[in-house]
Every structure is written in structure tokens, then in C-alpha cells.
Image (cartoon, grey):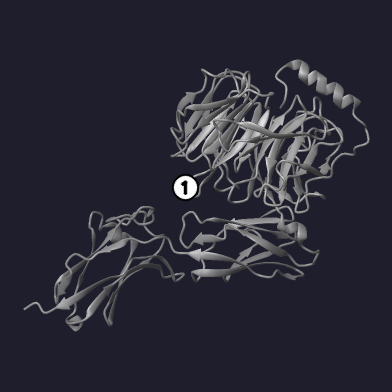
Amino acid sequence: MAFRAASALALFTVLTATAPAMAMQSPPNLNTAKLSQLDTHDNYNDVWGYQAPDGREYACVGTSSGVMIANCTDPLDAYEVGFFPGAFCTWRDLKTFNEYLYIVNDCSGGVDVIDMSDPEDPVQVNTFGAQYMNHAHNVAIDTDAGILYAAGTQNGMHVFDLNVNPVNPPRIDRWGGPYVHDVSVQDDVAHAALIYNGQYRVLDVSDPSNVSTMTNVPSGANFTHATWPNADNSVVVAADEKSALRHLTFFDTTNTLNPLVASRYTENSLSIPHNPFIKEDVCHVSWYTEGYIALDISDPYNPVKLGRYDTQPGTPAGGISGFDGAWGCYPFSPSGAIYISDRQRGLFVVSLNECSAGLPNLPQPQVCRVWPDSVSALDSPRQRVMLTGKGFTSATQVSVGGAILGSNDFTRLGDQVIHFRMPLVSSVGFNNITVSNGAGTSLPIQVEVTLPSGPTIDAGEVDQEVGSDFLVAFGSQPGDFFYPVASLSPLPSSVFEVNFDIGNSFTELIWLPSKVANMAGVNGFPVVVPPSALGLTVYWQVAVVDPLQGVPAMVTSVVSTTVIDND
């Protein structure tokens, strides 16, 4: 949001009232589905995302009183893990770099730093830069270069080097040109939004300690709020935060020194866009009263509307002040989930069903995407699987690797999304998934079923004597959590087998959970080496198997020893 005074909102009310009244109400939601929503605070502003090294995904949401962090690893079941109170302020912005979250607000202080190395228990570790600025509207990070830019301050854009110290970085420059409302940076170029100048300015940041201007171009409505480049820097989008007929401008930036207007896009003349982002060939925009808008810009000279999710369907275009609804969006989660922050209604986690848009209309269901594309054979609780496609409203059955799910075993989210808990299947590897209705069955899509990492074998002596006890011990590895050392706890839900392959012979031991439970504190299973193994190389490998499904829970590494005579 551009202004920091009540009079600014009044000005926008006038602009809205005097805008051309030719726009129609936008169509309903398009190629999207709400997966979950969190509304545990008040007066929300921007949103960003964080991915932990182990793949867990988090949304970081600003509010007028602080920042909420939510686990969105299962996008259908988001939950809050922490809230960090701060100075009361309508405007907050936040970005991530490595394991840190950086936060600014437009009312006081410097840059707050939250350590996300344990994302279920994040910790605020510092605030830096307050000696240089008493507020900042926006924070941007060149993640490849490790340089942070604090923009929208009272005295220029401040540049900090996170490589030196990510918690307390030194300031290396202050660019004192015109007020920079927002900025995005990659590949030695900063794309600055000079809102009060109505310009998109290109800055050379190849030397971040000496930022300089490369060129300027006007944006569509002379109120340049935000910019974002695509991955190869051939397209930049600029958003003008005002009711107008030229909301978004797509620039052809093949020549960085000479950006050319490729096209302009307006959702309707009464509404106000806010923050645009480009991921691959899609431009994602938080558009206040219009919610979240997705545009196909594979041809930037002809953007085509791909998706929409209205976070406030009861609010007309323009609303009361124009600023109700979707403030921010984050389209970069590896899972593909879109995070949307609605000013009044909190965090929305939404699916953009890009592949559904290209499917023909057929009587039977169609499946074009499965998430995740790889699941563990024995996760407990069973892992959630989500299918994207078309024609799901009439679906009656889902087949997963031979396991059949009836209509009570899966959930439809409109016509394009189905989700369910992964059933036990009869084999690891790639398993087909199909969806059926009364008219037929979809073509299959595959999900990979994998084994969790297993324990290692502690073989003890290199050589084993005939008749000796060979102790096969379970040893934990980083990331193992299914069956810890000794007590095998938590226990499998049913009878399982522990198999020992000994040379050319095979011994099978059947253990009941109750019997294994009585072995708490024992480090393994003693196995007597048979005389028939004399002179053989013995291969020890342990597999824990669910005999009801025939699916290994885990398989150890292979250890070989030689059996010798005990004389």
C-alpha cells in the first residue's frame, strides 16, 4: 500500500468514485481451489514463504501487530507455529534468506531477524539498521548475491551485506535517489518502483556498494507500486496501485537499457492491484478486492487470464476504499501452493490448477497432476495425496496401485481437486492412480512409493565362528524415526517379520508386537550361525515387513562376513 496517512485513503476514495464506470464485476473463481485458511489475528498485510532444508513449507504473514508463522507442509491442514509481536503498523514486509526471516515495518525500527533453523520453534535473534532508518516500507533480498535492500525509508534505500553476518550485517551503501517504494533484485540488476515519480527505474547493482541508475521508463498509470522480473530477465511486470485502465504493464526487457512496453492488463477499472510476481510463464498478482489473479504470460505481448481466487466474494470491485481484500501473494512454494494474505480474513492457502485449464471437456474424469509425486510406504499417519484435473464433481472411485477408495474415502474440492490419505499398496515403486465416474475412468497418473531410510547393521566381529551368536543390531541414522534402536518403538501396527539372509540359507523369525515390546533395552536379535554356512560369505540384511500388505517398512544396508571353523 502506497500512502501512510488517512488522507491517502480519502484520495483513493475520490479516485475510485471518479473512475470510468465501464467495468463489470469479475467472473467467479477460475482454476483455483481453497486448501486451507488461518484467521487467528487482525489487520493482515504482506506474506512470504520459507522452505526448510528437509522440505517442510511455511507461510510468514505480516499483521498490524506482528508476524505469524504457519506450517503449510500439508497445504490442506495449515497451522500456526508462532507469532512475533512488533510495533503497531499497517505496513509490514518480509523476505527470507537461508534460514533467516527478515521483517521491516513502515512505522518504526530497523530490520527484525528471525532464526528459522527450527521452523517449529522460530526465535527472534536481532534487529539491525535502526541507526540508519526509522522505518522501511519494503525489504528485498538478492538471494544469489546475499545482499539485502531496505527501501521506502525516510532517507533513501539502504544496502546490507548478509554474507558478512546474516544476523547483524554491515551497511555497505545508501542510495539517495528518488523514493523507492518497492524493489526486486536479481542478476546484478534492481528493478525499482518509484511510486511518486510514476517510474520503473533500472539500477545497476553489480557493485552493491555503489548503486547507480541505468534507465527510467514510466509505468501505465504513473503510480508505480511494485515490480518483478521473470527468471531470464526478458520480462518485467510493474503494477500501479490505483484504480485505472492500465493496472499492469509488462515490459520487454530483452535489452535492459531499453525496456519496451509489451502489453498492459486491467482486471477492471474500479479495482486496485497491489503486488505482482512472475514464476515461469505465470504472473501472480494480489489484487485487493479482486483477490488473487493469475495471468499466462508465455506471450508477454498478449497476457491471458489463467486463474482467480476471490478472498472476499461479497465485496464489490473497489470496495469501500479500494484496499479491502488480498494484500499479498506468494507463488514460490515447491509444492505449488499459493499463499494469499487477505487484509481482513487472514492467510489463504490456494491451489492454482494450471494444468486443468488445458484439459478438454470429457464425460469421464481427467487427472493432470499428483502432489506429492513421491510418498513413503509406511508413513504414519498416512501421507496426504492431492490430485488436480477436471470432472471430479461426479467422481465415485479412486484407484491407487490396486487399492480402491470409495466416495467416502476421498474429498472433492470443487471440480478440479481431490485429496485422500495414501492407502497401503502392494508394491513399492511407481503406482498408477485413476479416477472414475459413471462415464468411465481417467488415464493413469503415477505416484512413486518409496521405502523410508533403514537402520544399519552392526556386524561386530569381521569373522564369525560356527555356533557363535551373531548379534544383529539396529543403529540409527540421521532422519530415521520409524523404529529407533533397541525398543523398536513406535511398533508397527500389525505383525511384522524380521528376515536374515545368511549365505545360501534363509532363516525367518516371526515377531508379535507384544513380544518385541518385551525386548525393550535389547540391542538386537541373537542369531546362531549354522554349520552349513562354514566357508561361506554371509550376507546380513534385515527387512521389516508388513505381511498383510507385503510392503517392507525398511531394509538395512548389507553387511558381509566370513564364517570360520571354531576349532
| 383 in relation to 122, above or below | below
Q: Is mark 1 on a helix, strand or loop?
A: loop
Q: Where is residue 406 in the image (x, y as percent from the top left)?
A: 64, 63
Question: Relative to 404, is 256 on the left or the right?
Answer: right
Q: Is residue 300 left or right of residue 368?
A: right
**Hey, which quadrant is residue 551 in on the image?**
bottom left
In the shown orientation, is residue 372 left or right of residue 45?
Answer: left
In the image: residue 554, left or right of residue 437: left
Image location of residue 317, percent across then percent down = 83, 34
Foreground pick, 118 / 254: 254
What residue appears at the point 57 percent right and 19 percent down from the top-left corner?
133
Q: Which amino acid does label 1 sit on?
A: Pro
- Where in the figure is residue 449, as x and y percent of width and height? 51, 65
Tally of numbered discs: 1
Where is residue 324 shown, x and y percent of the image?
75, 29
Considering the image in quadrants, where does the N terminus appear?
Answer: top right
Residue 366 seen in render:
yes
What quarter of the picture does the C terminus occupy? bottom left
* Residue 409 visible to the viewer: no
Q: Write down the residue under mark 1.
A: 53
